[in-house]
Amino acid sequence: MTKKESFESDNIETTKKIAYKFADRFLKGRERVVVFLKGDLGSGKTTFVRFILESFGIEESEFNGSPSFTIVNTYGNIYHIDLYRIDEDFVYETGIFEMIESGGIFLIEWPKGSIEADIVVEFTQIDENRRRIDVYHS
């Protein structure tokens, strides 16, 4: 990743606007893209994914939350993946590599293994309400 763009949010509406702009700029119109979402628990990764999905027309009522236990939630050609509970060796057994090869938009929380990202989004909680969102891309 050669470029870094930083955004700051101090409320949910600002985070939503950032997620919509991110989806428009980096995701829409692409046949395959792998996005890593990094940050501490509660830093805003899953909320960001929810807003990205909304920008694609997926209603909040259709959003299944974090796939911590299911590992993958699928929304058409968009895959929300959470590897938090997964051992690195088990990543190979999940079939995620095969999914990525077939194409789609992959939003991966807690990435591990040898999956390579096209874009990395890093969330830093500054205080109770403020988050910095750094986007690394080429």
Image (spheres, helix red, strand yellow):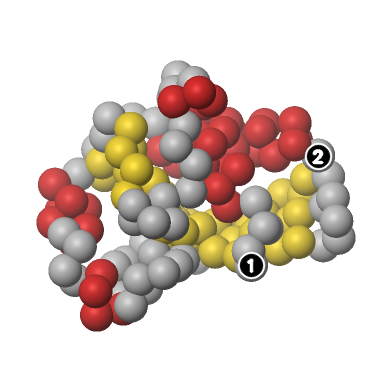
Q: Is residue 6 above or below residue 116?
A: above
As drawn, is 130 to the left or to the right of 135?
right
Label 2: which secondary element: loop
Q: Using the rendered image of the protein, determine whether residue 37 is visible from the camera's viewpoint.
A: yes
Q: Residue at x 76, y 61 (%)?
A: 125
Q: Is residue 109 above or below residue 86?
A: above
Q: Earlier in the sequence, mark 1 or mark 2?
A: 2
The answer to which quarter of the image holds residue 64 is top left
Looking at the rendered structure, the kind of residue marked 2 is Asn
Q: Label 1 neighbourhood size at 10 Å, few (<14), some (14-19), many (20+)?
A: few
Q: Which mark is residue 15?
A: none
Looking at the rendered structure, the kind of residue marked 1 is Asp
As drawn, is 34 to the left or to the right of 98?
right
- For the C terminus, the quadrant is bottom left
Q: Which mark is residue 11?
A: 2
Q: Residue at x 58, y 52 (%)?
A: 45
Q: Where is residue 47 shown, x and y percent of the image?
A: 60, 43
Count the marks.
Answer: 2
As drawn, is 83 to the left or to the right of 89?
right
Q: Residue at x 50, y 23 (%)?
A: 61
Q: Residue at x 82, y 62 (%)?
A: 126
